Amino acid sequence: MTPVALTVAGSDSGGGAGVQADLKTFASLGVYGTCAITAITAQNTGGVRGVHPLPPEVVAAQIAAVREDFEVGAVKMGMLANAGIAAAVGTALRGARCVFDPVMASSSGDALAGEGFVAAARALLAQVELVTPNLAEAARLLDVAPARDEEGMAEQGRALLALGAKAVLMKGGHLDGEAVDLLVTRDGVHRYAAPRIASRNLHGTGCVLSSAISAHLALGYDLTQAVGRAKAFTRRAIENGRDLALGHGPGPLMPAP
């Protein structure tokens, strides 16, 4: 059977992040992509102009329609926009294998999550197989200052486990030095490191990574393998996109087989 993945995320009118990036990633990896849109954003490479969250019941109905007709192997949860949508998504995805990218702001710094979202996101941690916060997102989930080094990343990863997460991928892309992510589980810490790639076109990096992890889970890889393969895929997408000339601001990655 053709593997199927579902993305539950916002729509990016510029095509670089959100549902659009997720579906491109799924297709590049040979996985059939389905979607449930949580919010419509008006954005381009310069930033976010507007956000219109959909009613929670509409988001839940999209998920139900997909799950009743497709054998969904894995789900990527991205921008959930507000507490109501987060709660509805949690109910609609019970029993699903989920990767949660707790999006709270765009790469340009524009807010993408409303009041009460952090508490609702914490409530989802025990339900998902993996949560993939960047340093700012992990800090908000824990109500602490962002980690400043790998030791702090590992400590915050373990704190998220204590909140109920089964596994945490702490993304250290905003630290100096080589690009380091830490997969923190109850069995220990797995380090993924690589030299940085000089590129201004990094819009949607977190979306590509989390959707690539979901795709590899749908393909049958275990979590450690899925993260490693997704990291390699995302690196190739950055390399493929670094010379793109699209728009007037930071452009997207270019997911490709």
Image (cartoon, rainbow, N blue to C red):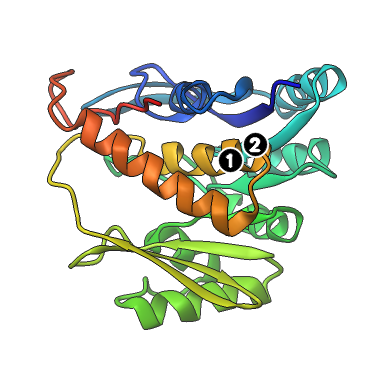
User: Which residue occupies the foreground of this view, 60 or 133?
Assistant: 133
Identify which amino acid the numbered label 1 is placed on.
His
Residue 97 position within the rendered picture, expressed as x and y whole percent measured from the top left = 74, 45
Please tell me the numbered disc located at residue 41: none
For the residues bearing labels 2 and 1, Cβ distance under 8 angstroms: yes
Q: Quadrant of residue 58?
A: top right
- Identity of the residue drawn at 68% across and 42% down: 220
Residue 115 position within the rendered picture, expressed as x and y whole percent measured from the top left = 55, 48
Q: Which residue is mark 2?
A: 219
* Residue 112 located left or right of residue 86: left
- Identity of the residue drawn at 84% across and 16% down: 69
Q: Is residue 210 above or below residue 249?
A: below
User: Which residue occupies the foreground of this view, 180 or 158?
Assistant: 180
Residue 144 position within the rendered picture, expressed as x and y whole percent measured from the top left = 45, 75
Q: CA distance from mark 2 to mark 1?
A: 5 Å
Residue 147 position within the rendered picture, expressed as x and y whole percent measured from the top left = 36, 74
Q: Secondary structure at mark 2?
A: loop
Q: Which residue is mark 1?
A: 216
User: Which residue occupies the foreground of this view, 89 or 149?
Assistant: 149
Quarter of the image with the C terminus is: top left
Q: Secondary structure at mark 1?
A: helix
Quarter of the image with the N terminus is: top right
The answer to whether residue 253 is visible is yes
- Identity of the residue drawn at 48% across and 45% down: 103
- Identity of the residue drawn at 51% across and 22% down: 23
Q: Quadrant of residue 87?
A: top right
How dense is the environment of label 2, judged by Cα within 10 Å: few (below 14), some, or many (20 and up)? some
Identify which amino acid the numbered label 2 is placed on.
Leu
